[in-house]
Image: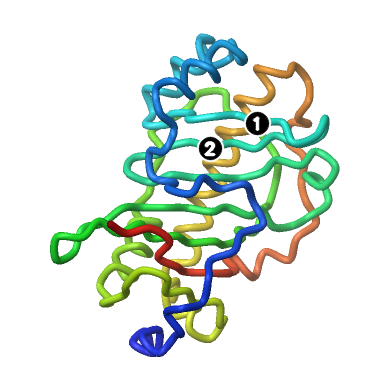
Amino acid sequence: MLDKILNINPQEKYKSGLKVPKNPLYSVNRHNQEKNHSKDSALFSPLAKMLSKINWKILSIEYPTNDEILLHFLVDDFEFITLIDFNEMYKKPFHEFTIYRGSKKQGKKLSYEVKLKTEKYEISILDKADQIKTEGISLLFDRITELNLYKNYKVTQSHILNNFVNGIEATINKELNYILRVIYTFITTKNGSRVKNNFILKTQQNIPIIMQKVAIIYAE
């Protein structure tokens, strides 16, 4: 059951494969935002303005290599970090996200982190962007915050993690795949024909979500 999470060693240090800010929630200050804006005029493009109307806000864009884009953005009260790798985009059936949401318990601010993979079905762009939905993602974080967890807790055991998404895997998968379409649309507009539209991946479509980690990484 979910309460087994309470037995995880609280001294285990957090590690991540992505470049994640130390204090992820709303961590890009005004000076950094101005720097990013001056370097990347796409943040002022008509597309970016349109996306801001559908509760999608870019915090930063980085280019680790010529074939990678690291996106850091907000949807509702969730903060996302994800890497788009053009060498793997059309090959790998799953895409990885790291998601954060803040909470407050007993006067302390907590930052919950979820690292997961969502199964992809196709790569396509949007003709018209609708409001992004996060009901399934919200329920996932609600289940986590219901537990009395504290700073430095981390869970990576699949038999525990699977309980968090039990019954809501398909909803979360649908929401994350739509967010991917928003990202592809942004990249296509920004980089021209970089993304192939309506590309169908060869996936079994039977594992909507693979949970990798749940952790509390920041508290004050």
Q: At which x and y percent is residue 178?
A: 53, 42
Residue nearest the observer in this picture, 84 or 196: 84
Q: Is residue 40 depicted above or below 102 in this figure?
A: above
Identify the residue under disc 2: 72
Q: At which x and y percent is residue 60?
A: 54, 29
Identify the residue under disc 1: 62
As measured in the structure, the alpha-carbon distance from the residue carrying label 1 to the one carrying label 2 is: 9 Å
Q: Is residue 5 left or right of residue 178?
A: left
Where residue 63 sits, quadrant-wise, is top right
Q: Which residue is at 61% across, 59% downward?
A: 16
Q: Quadrant of the C terminus?
A: bottom left
Label 2 sits on what residue type? His
Q: Is residue 195 left or right of residue 144?
A: right
Q: At which x and y percent is residue 88?
A: 82, 47
Residue nearest the observer in this picture, 124 or 149: 149
Q: Are marks 1 and 2 in contact (CB under 8 Å)?
A: yes
